[in-house]
Amino acid sequence: MRVESPRRRKPSTNLTPLVDVVFILLVFFMLASSFMEWRSINLNTPPHGGGAGGERALLVRLYPERRLDVNGEPVTMSQLVALIEDRMKESPETRVLVQPKADLPLQEVVTVLDYLSMAGARQVSLTH
């Protein structure tokens, strides 16, 4: 007497849960993404061991709590913009060196760079 054992079925892989997870991840990343237009800021970095590049350079120092000074003299943001606009009318090739303090938030540096750009400064460099 021969007893036949029941045939084993091949285990089938159900892809439905995998597709569900991938779809949920896709929706999550689409909702979490930002579709705003990014702008870049062009900066000229000084050469190694660089300097101010002569008398035509302005040194703008940024301090916490939105304090600024230009070549050692304290200024407000509106005074800075007016000074840069006047200087650019006289000499458009004037370099502007921006020196942020180490603990300054990056957004404050970018804000000052935007104001310098709007005032007409074309040769802007970051220094430390």
Image (cartoon, helix red, strand yellow):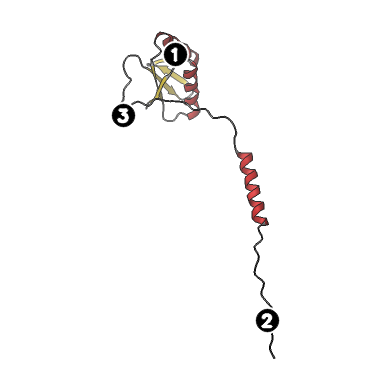
What residue is at 49 percent from the left and 28 percent from the top? 40
| Screen quadrant of the C terminus | top left
Q: Residues within 10 Å of mark 2 (few under 14, many from 20)?
A: few
Give the numbered dot on residue 84: 1
Q: CA distance from mark 2 to mark 1?
A: 92 Å
Q: Would you name the residue on which mark 3 appears?
A: 48
Give the image location of residue 80, x and y in percent. Answer: 46, 14
Q: Nearer the viewer, residue 85 or 19?
A: 19
The numbered disc on residue 5 is 2
Q: Amino acid at mark 3?
A: His
Q: Quadrant of the N terminus?
A: bottom right
* Lower sequence index among marks 1 and 3: 3
User: Residue 81: x, y in percent?
Assistant: 48, 14
Label 1 element class = helix
Q: Residue at x 64, y 62 (%)?
A: 13
Tell me the mark number nearer the camera, choosing from 2 and 1. 2
Q: Tell whether 85 sits left or right of 36.
A: left
**Which residue is at a point 44% across and 19% down the rendered structure image?**
68
